[in-house]
Amino acid sequence: MKRRSIQAETSSARAEDSLCRALLALDTLAEMRAFLRDLCTPAELEALTDRWRVVPYILKGVPYREIHDRTAVSITTIGRVARFLSQGNGGYLAALAHASGDPSDATVAHKRPAARRTSA
């Protein structure tokens, strides 16, 4: 982890806020896609896509190995997403609720037990 001064941390927080505002300002799927493709490397965009792709499976309680078999996303990534779904900042669930148009979808699904790893 990089060591940063307090001033750099404050500047970093402002930059993060600016990025969040830029994301919120985009109106269409095409605009968002263009922005993400400009902002991220192909590998970064693939990592984001992989994380988002496994969310519905985790919320449905699908075993990690089955999620991996269906999506080719690594077990490590699946576990990381599951951890953030249960212990994170609520971002995945908020995004899922907005994407589905029904905020209760994410809340109800999230109350289900988390998927567990199965032996290979």
Image (cartoon, rainbow, N blue to C red):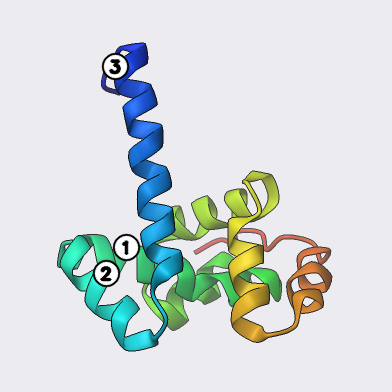
Which corner quadrant holds the N terminus? top left
Mark 1 vs 3, N-terminal side:
3
Mark 2 element type = helix
Pointer 2 with pointer 3, Cβ within 8 A: no
Is residue 92 positioned above or below 87 on the image? below
Camera-near label (1 vs 3) is 3
Q: From the top left corner, tell me how far across and down residue 36 is, in percent.
A: 27, 69
Residue at 68 percent of width and 74 percent of height = 97
Identify which amino acid the numbered label 2 is placed on. Answer: Leu
Q: CA distance from mark 1 to mark 3?
A: 26 Å
- Residue 36 is labelled as 2
Q: From the top left corner, tell me how far across and down residue 91 is, in percent.
A: 59, 57
Residue at 60 percent of width and 49 percent of height = 83
- Residue 24 is labelled as none
Q: From the top left corner, tell me how far across and down residue 111 is, in percent.
A: 83, 63
Of the pair 40 and 8, the residue shown nearer to us: 8
